[in-house]
Image (tube, helix red, strand yellow):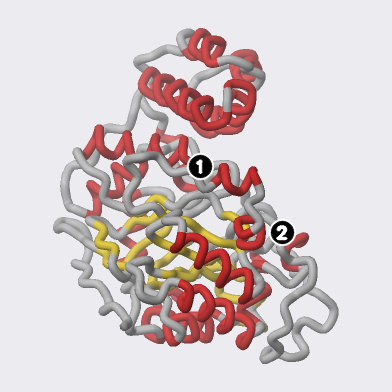
Amino acid sequence: MTAPAPSITEGAGSASALRIGSIELASPVVLAPMAGVTNVAFRTLCRELEIARTGTVSGLYVCEMVTARALVERHPVTMHMTTFAPEESPRSMQLYTVDPEYTYAAAKMIVDEDLADHIDMNFGCPVPKVTRKGGGSAIPYKRTLFRKIVAAAVRATEGTDIPVTVKFRIGIDDEHRTHLDAGRIAAEEGAKAVALHARTASQRYSGQADWDEIARLKDHVTDVPVLGNGDIFEPVDAVEMMRRTGCDGVVIGRGCLGRPWLFAELAAEMNGVEAPTPPTLGEVADIIVRHCELLVAHHGEMKGCREIRKHVAWYLRGFPAGSELRRQMALVETVDQLRELVATLPADVPFPTDGHGPRGRQGSPAKVALPDGWLDDPDEDVVPEGAEIMHSGG
């Protein structure tokens, strides 16, 4: 049975909620899966900071995306990526998939082994090595194949409380837009929500997200929630997206890089309460160390310290930290080394005004690499060969 569209209060100043199938969320905010970022360490940190600042966890935190085939074949790295903290609820897992059979097997495995409470499928990756094989954001153009993949996941979860949701882009490029069909097809096949990254694959992460297309999708898909993604870097951006488009929730990706406390700020903005004060440099230093501790607990000290290095630049954006200190922090090998280095930062420096805004990859628009003849027949349902590649979402 299709869940009713959620009741969302308009604008800030009052509580907002989101229902995705059986899952009730206190705020309509979703953490987007990002490869190498949204592992159990980062999700735990986001949750801890939201609880510390608001007293509760209100949104949905999605794990790193895993490949359906690798999950079914129990690849050790993939299985490690599916780690959830004991207190995580709901447990949300995103699948990268191109094959209805592996989609069904992976979703059935999630159900039978109680691996997650929610399954999302991502068809938004614009990376050339993925689209060149017919994966990622190339898939929704093949309407019949896309339909079969969504239907397979829904069929595997029938009779359970595990909702299936689907994320995609506007299309391959401006001449090949697919989001309206993708949203309709996903809803028809039983998906409990759809999410739109409001860029084409050819835009990659460049330029501005076209929020008007989120509004079009919301008008087109009326029986399940529609979530918007793209260019949400501040809490006011989320409120403005919902106001302008009528979407039922927001998906946050690059905006939270180096700002895991953003979800506490979003929850406050959505519920019309005073937002927590942005952290000082001393507080950010403590968060960096806590993040590293969580990464070490998940990966071990060697890999955990390698992983924290990329986060440091995001955390210190706009803060006064000399190039030599930044260089040393980018080479840390132990948590103790990191503690010593962050202890030298001036603790009372307030959060910088230029610490906000776009973060992470942006790049330039480019022609989308596709298999030969990919655009010839949108109704073809042949599974693309060699497209089971782990990638970073979209």
Viewer-side residue, 207 vs 191: 191
| Amino acid type, callout 1 | Asn
In the depicted structure, whether residue 80 falls above or below residue 136: above
Residue 211 seen by the camera:
no
Residue 185 seen by the camera:
yes
What is the crowding at mark 2: few (fewer than 14 residues within 10 Å), some, or many (at least 20)? some
Q: Which residue is mark 1?
A: 39
Image quarter (top left, top right, bottom left or bottom right) of the C terminus = bottom right
Q: Position of residue 50 (x, y in %)?
A: 29, 39
Q: Position of residue 189 (x, y in %)?
A: 46, 84
For the residues bearing labels 2 and 1, Cβ distance under 8 angstroms: no
Label 2 SS: loop
Q: Is residue 197 left or right of residue 70?
A: left
| Amino acid type, callout 2 | Ile
The quarter of the displayed image where residue 122 is located: bottom right
Image quarter (top left, top right, bottom left or bottom right) of the N terminus = bottom left
Q: CA distance from mark 2 to mark 1?
A: 19 Å
Report the disc number at residue 313: none
Viewer-side residue, 263 vs 380: 380
Viewer-side residue, 25 vs 358: 25
Q: Position of residue 258 (x, y in %)?
A: 48, 36
Q: Which residue is rendered at x = 61% and y = 59% of the image?
A: 72
What is the crowding at mark 1: few (fewer than 14 residues within 10 Å), some, or many (at least 20)? many
Q: Which residue is rendered at x = 31% and y = 73% of the image?
A: 246
Label 1 SS: loop
Q: Which residue is mark 2?
A: 389
The quarter of the displayed image where residue 313 is located: top right
